Amino acid sequence: MIPSPTSKGPARNEPCSCGSGRKFKHCCGAVIPVHAAPEPPLRAARARSPDYTVHAAAETVHLGRAVSLDAKRSCGTCTACCDGWMTGTVRGHEMKPGIPCHFRGAGCCTIYDERPANPCRSFFCAWRLEGNPFPEFFRPDRLGVIIVARQWRDRLGYELISAGRDPDENLLNWMREFSTASGSPFLYSIDGYYRAFGVPEFQEDMRARAARGELPSLHDPSAPLRLHPTAG
């Protein structure tokens, strides 16, 4: 079992802590399905931006400010971000589901010191960021899920990217408790269908993006994350 976050929100049938007057399960504790748009528009969206998944689901955004990596954590032999769970093009070589990065070695990146800015240096695993809330065993290759920190409006949010398996109920319960306690919404997909958990405004934003034929995302290209100059 995954240990629960220390802070808990109201029970599902109690009044929501946001002050709306509604029950928690019908307000900030609701989980809504965010159905993908019909297949043709969805394919068209991907065609317009071949690196969409990397930009939309893997580039950490934090109000455009510099961040640091946790000095006590390292990627080790984890290559989840290079294993083909996301799409991108690295030095002319396509990476996509089923096809890992051309430069992925045995538990390492063979061009790490010379890796390109996009999609490589613009990607930050939330598990490695300084001050992150995630346990040690949430490292992507152990968890089977990549958790990416992103900025959504005035608050930090998270996207869960399947890296070998879809998020299971233990992980989702942990994320729901953490989201309720911290106010950080999150987005995930199971069997190709997106779901959003968080405040009603977040849910509506994700639903509106899907209705426009976009993949639901926390991506905000106007606020790219930068690695602090003193960070490794």
Image (cartoon, rainbow, N blue to C red):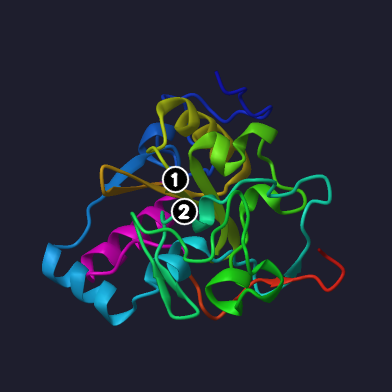
The region drawn magenta spans 197-218
Q: Quadrant of residue 123?
A: bottom right
Q: Does 207 appear in magenta? A: yes
- Amino acid bearing label 2: Asp
Identify the image quadrant of the C terminus: bottom right
Of the numbered discs in the image, which one, if any, rests on residue 232?
none
Question: Which residue corresponds to the image point at 57% horizontal and 23% vertical from the top-left?
Answer: 2
Residue marked by disc 2: 83
Which sits in the foreground, 38 or 78?
Answer: 78
Which of the two discs, 2 and 1, labels the residue nearer the N terminus? 2
Above or below — where is 222 with respect to 110? below
Of the numbered discs in the image, which one, if any, rests on residue 163?
1
| Callout 2 touching callout 1 (CB < 8 Å) | yes
Q: Residues within 10 Å of mark 2 (few under 14, many from 20)?
A: many
Q: Cα distance, mark 2 to mark 1?
A: 8 Å
Report helix, strand or loop for mark 1.
Answer: loop
Question: Which residue corresponds to the image point at 56% horizontal and 35% vertical from the top-left?
Answer: 142
Above or below — where is 7 with respect to 118? above
Asked if one can make out residue 16 in the rendered structure from this viewpoint, the answer is yes
Report helix, strand or loop for mark 2.
Answer: loop
